[in-house]
């Protein structure tokens, strides 16, 4: 090794960001292992690489003691002072023991260490890049499919879309370009593992932020997301600016913005509702597209009872309970849905009066001013 070797290390430092001193320290440690492995040495030793010339030397190390137990590891004080009178007990005496044919081994070892460190540096760069992007969207190309796992190429690395994170109504094939949500980035011995999802509610949130400038700018706030991937989702949006319609902003001109998201999610239906600080109105909106007559709230228990017209009961509950289930996820309330006739049977004197007697938060929504503008269903377009 020589100055050309050092020049190569400095170039690596510029290109890969790996400090020359770090590389040299690693090479010295590797050369010491190679020396002991190839020359069967049981003695203590040290390898030194000159930072100016690139030359390397191997030194044996013996500790100065009063009585020598192993002459490969120890030296008497008298013998040490023959080398240099300044030696004292406990000092370490070094002698150069560089083998004649060690140069070839040193060159091979240095190359292996440099390659390994470059690989590690690139892995660290990839890890830092993607770990800082957790909860963000990536776009990649399907590279291969192994044991139902989808491997997505992301330039110098790849992401893994496991079966549990794949949408049930989607099929994937080599060369497909898809968007996915970064769930987790792990460090492993084989390099960073990037796990992504197509079913995570965060994917829907980030897609809206990409499509709707008002969300990115903070004019409109996305308050809550409830999603059953591949089937249906609900989002609640809000704007402090009375001049901005949060639902309309998310829908876009002629429904263009939300339709782009529906297309990206292969036809997943999306309900967009206006979030309301009034829990009763918010719960009523969450059951879109069903009409709600009245809402009773137990705020401490996070429970709501909702009354709907008889003909709207099945719509409010939804197929296999999906609409009610999504509304509950969206609002964070357990929702009990009753038809008007069911409530009339429970409260023959009138359920409005029964609410007031029980002193629960109550809203009669027939004249509350709620309109179709507060609700939106993506499938309408």
Image: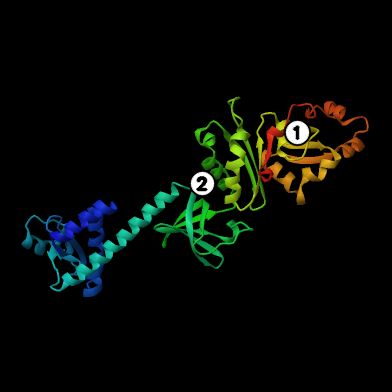
Where the C terminus falls, by quadrant? top right
The residue to which callout 1 is attached is 298
Between 264 and 57, the residue placed more toward the observer is 264
Q: Circle 2 sits in a helix, a strand or a loop, which is it?
A: loop
Mark 1 or 2, closer to the camera:
2
Q: Residue furthest top?
A: 242
Residue 47 placement: quadrant: bottom left
Q: Residues within 10 Å of mark 2 (few under 14, many from 20)?
A: some
Between 200 and 44, the residue placed more toward the observer is 200
Question: Could you tell which of marks 1 and 2 lies nearer the N-terminus?
Answer: 2
The residue to which callout 2 is attached is 135
Where the N terminus falls, by quadrant? bottom left
User: Residue 115, percent across and down?
Assistant: 29, 63
- Is residue 32 visible in the rendered structure shown here? no
Left of 368 or right of it: where is 234? Answer: left
User: Residue 186, percent across and down?
Assistant: 46, 55
User: Residue 167, percent across and down?
Assistant: 61, 56
């Amino acid at each position: 090794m020589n100055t050309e070797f050092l020049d190569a290390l400095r170039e690596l430092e510029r290109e890969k960001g790996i400090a020359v001193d770090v590389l040299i320290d690693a090479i010295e440690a590797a050369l010491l292992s190679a020396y002991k492995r190839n020359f069967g040495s049981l003695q203590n030793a040290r390898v030194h690489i000159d930072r100016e010339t690139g030359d390397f030397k191997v030194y044996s190390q013996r500790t100065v003691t009063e009585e020598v137990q192993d002459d490969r590891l120890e030296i008497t004080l008298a013998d040490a002072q023959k080398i240099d009178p300044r030696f004292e007990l406990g000092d370490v005496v070094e002698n150069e023991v560089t083998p004649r044919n060690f140069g070839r081994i040193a060159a091979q070892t240095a190359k292996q260490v440099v390659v390994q460190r470059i690989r590690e540096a690139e892995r660290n760069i990839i890890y830092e890049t993607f770990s800082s992007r957790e909860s963000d969207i990536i776009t990649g190309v399907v590279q291969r499919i192994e044991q139902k796992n989808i491997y997505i190429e992301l330039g110098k690395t790849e992401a893994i879309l496991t079966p549990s994170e794949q949408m049930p109504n989607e099929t994937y094939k080599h060369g497909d370009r898809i968007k996915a949500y970064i769930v987790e980035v792990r460090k492993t011995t084989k390099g960073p593992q990037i796990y992504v999802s197509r079913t995570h509610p965060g994917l829907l949130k980030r897609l809206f932020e990409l499509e709707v400038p008002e969300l990115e700018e903070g004019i409109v706030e996305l308050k809550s997301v409830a999603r059953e991937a591949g089937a249906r989702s609900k989002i609640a949006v809000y704007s402090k600016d009375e001049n901005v319609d949060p639902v309309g902003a998310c829908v876009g001109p002629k429904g263009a913005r939300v339709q782009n998201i529906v297309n990206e999610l292969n036809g997943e239906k999306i309900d967009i509702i206006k979030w309301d600080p009034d829990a009763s109105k918010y719960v009523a909106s969450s059951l879109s597209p069903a009409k709600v007559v009245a809402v009773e709230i137990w705020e401490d228990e996070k429970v709501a009872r909702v009354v709907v017209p008889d003909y709207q009961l099945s719509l409010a509950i939804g197929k296999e309970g999906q609409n009610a289930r999504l509304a509950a996820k969206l609002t964070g309330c357990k929702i009990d849905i009753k038809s008007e006739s069911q409530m009339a049977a429970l409260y023959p004197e009138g359920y409005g009066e029964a609410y007031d007697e029980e002193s629960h938060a109550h809203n009669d929504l027939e004249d509350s001013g709620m309109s179709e503008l507060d609700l939106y269903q993506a499938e309408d377009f």
